[in-house]
Image (spheres, helix red, strand yellow):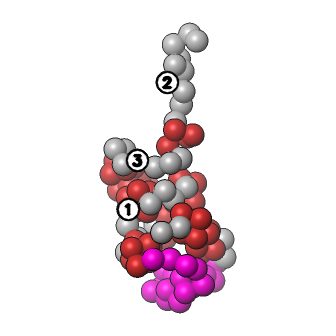
């Protein structure tokens, strides 16, 4: 499993309108360009955002992918509550410092 390849594939899907629309319509041939294992490929095809999060997809890429495939509110309602306790190597980077707001 390569976090880099998975993140690169996601970026490649959402950065181009034609690729995004093809993916939305069930054309997953774009995934053949990347060295993805079966689990990564299945998570993308199944739009399993909590699993993608657990696979260390960068939070910004995950949100952008969700935004082009679903209404934005869907991510906040359906994904955010499910990823709270799942480890992700980027989590500490994007969370506020532990002493924030404590007069540090």
Mark 1 or mark 2: whose residue is earlier in sequence: 1
Assess whether mark 3 and mark 1 are in contact (beta carbons under 8 angstroms).
no
* Secondary structure, magenta segment, majority class: helix
The spot of residue 86 in percent (x, y) is 36, 48
List the residue tagged with mark 2. 98
Circle 1 SS class: helix
The spot of residue 16 in percent (x, y) is 66, 76
Q: Residue at x 58, y 70 (%)?
A: 5
Q: Which residues are magenta?
A: 17-37
Query: Residue at the front extreme?
Result: 1
The residue lying toward the viewer, choosing from 21 and 101, is 101
Query: Residue at the top extreme?
Result: 103
Cα gap from disc 1 to disc 2, whole angstroms: 26 Å
Circle 3 SS class: loop
Q: Residue at x 55, y 87 (%)?
A: 32
Apparent side of residue 99 relative to residue 76 in the rendered image (left or right): right
Q: Residues within 10 Å of mark 2 (few under 14, many from 20)?
A: few
Cα gap from disc 1 to disc 3, whole angstroms: 11 Å
Residue 39 shown in magenta: no
Q: Residues within 10 Å of mark 1 (few under 14, many from 20)?
A: some
List the residue tagged with mark 3. 87
The spot of residue 29 in percent (x, y) is 53, 89
The spot of residue 45 in percent (x, y) is 42, 78
Residue 51, labelled with which disc? 1
Mark 1 or mark 3: whose residue is earlier in sequence: 1
């Amino acid at each position: 499993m390569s976090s880099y390849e998975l993140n690169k594939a996601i970026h490649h899907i959402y950065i181009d309108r034609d690729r995004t629309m093809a993916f939305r319509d069930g054309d997953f041939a774009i995934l053949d360009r990347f060295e993805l294992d079966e689990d990564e490929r299945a998570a993308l095809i199944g739009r399993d955002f909590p699993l993608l999060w657990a696979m260390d997809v960068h939070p910004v890429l995950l949100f952008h992918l969700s935004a082009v495939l679903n209404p934005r509110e869907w991510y906040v309602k359906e994904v955010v509550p499910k990823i709270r306790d799942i480890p992700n190597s980027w989590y500490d980077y994007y969370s506020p410092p532990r002493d924030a707001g404590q007069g540090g």
